[in-house]
Image (cartoon, rainbow, N blue to C red):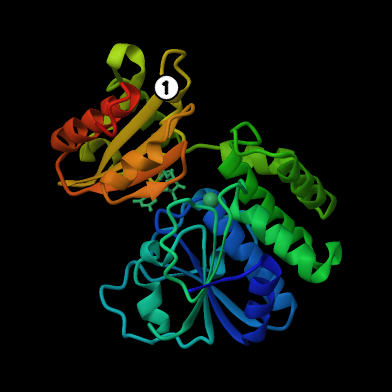
Amino acid sequence: MQKLTLIEAGQKILEAGNIVITAHVSPDGDGIGSALGLCHYLRNRGKAAQVVFDDRLPIAFRFLKGYEEIEDISDRPEIQPGERPADLLVVLDTDLGRVGRVREYVGKDVTTVNIDHHRTNDEQADYLFCDYRIAAVAEIIYELIVGLSGQEGLTKDIADCLYTGICTDTGFFRYSNTRPATHRAAAALVEAGAEPSVISETLDARPADRQRALAAAVQTMELFADGKIGGIFLPYELVKDIESTEGFIDFVRVIDTVEVAVMIKESQPGRCKASLRSKGMDVGSVAMQFGGGGHYRAAGCTVEEPLSAAKAKIIEAVTALVEGKAHE
Ligand code: 5GP
Ligand code: MN
């Protein structure tokens, strides 16, 4: 592994002709927005570039240019190693461990450039740029494009994608990861054509069945540790037909006494995906105890247990964190 500056990472990418771009499974606005934004830029520079995910893409992001062209290999039970030849695999918003089978799909010996902002990055890529102070990978891709091509490198399509990524990872500029540079990047993206009100209204639009599921999810709310922990716990039956539970955790996160919010959903029978949010404590360390990771204040993990067992284990670990016993 070799660490690169951002400009070096950009130059390394431009040395390739045929580039596959991917991001983490459970795709979110930052993963999809930064991958599509980079893809548009590379195509504008005459490269063959393609975004590939090994997971279903939330339809909430279908307004982004290029969404329809993203290749999703998740419904293919088998893929051949090296089936999709490329000179370079660019991995965004995660390390190589969380991209599903995309590495196998392009071939394990294909050179990897990894651009990330997670503290928990495993540094396994051939070339790495990782800065956890930067709010979103979309903000990093903005800096990369402007560093290589100036403001002229930004088109409206790129601006929409990157603005969306920044908004999703900062909660529309409200989370503590929002810095002056984040606003400057956003301002430049608006100058390049991104429309904040259109993007925010589009991302806020919810299907009715999601709202019904949220109402049921709210009924599962429990508080622990004198109200310092708030949780919602979603059995498989409740989530099996809804596309996304994005934002559900905010219902408990905003409770005034809550320091750590937990959402555990049984994504398949016997398998639970947990999301953790804090107002200052290191929930990334808790996620890592269960083989997951993330940021200081936003992290997640998957536990191979039914809901009740996953809930007991995770609430125990979070209780140790809030009661200051995490390392005893
Ligand atoms: P979410 O709860 O929204 O799925 O994820 C919150 C943050 O934690 C995101 O930055 C996400 O990339 C990270 N994260 C969620 N689940 C996992 C996991 O299983 N492993 C790792 N390494 N990171 C995760
Ligand atoms: Mn991100």
Q: Residue furthest front?
A: 328
State the image coordinates of residue 327 (x, y, percent, origin top left): 28, 34
Question: Looking at the image, which residue is at 40% across and 73% down?
Answer: 102
Q: Is residue 86 above or below residue 77?
A: below
Question: Looking at the image, which residue is at 39% across and 36% down?
Answer: 283
Q: Is residue 156 above or below residue 322?
A: below
In the rendered image, is residue 158 in sight?
A: no
Query: Between residues 251 and 175, which one lies in front from this camera angle?
Result: 175
Residue type marked 1: Glu
Q: Is residue 160 toward the left or the right of residue 52 in the image?
A: right
Quarter in which the C terminus is drawn: top left
Mark 1: few/some/many CA within 10 Å (<14, 14-19, 20+): many
Question: Looking at the image, which residue is at 31% across and 80% down?
Answer: 79
Q: Quadrant of residue 172?
A: top right
Q: Is residue 33 toward the left or the right of residue 319 in the image?
A: right
In the rendered image, is residue 47 in sight?
A: yes
Label 1 secondary element:
loop
State the image coordinates of residue 318 (x, y, percent, origin top left): 29, 30
Q: Tell me the residue that label 1 is attached to.
A: 259
State the image coordinates of residue 71 (x, y, percent, origin top left): 47, 71
Q: Quadrant of residue 203?
A: top right
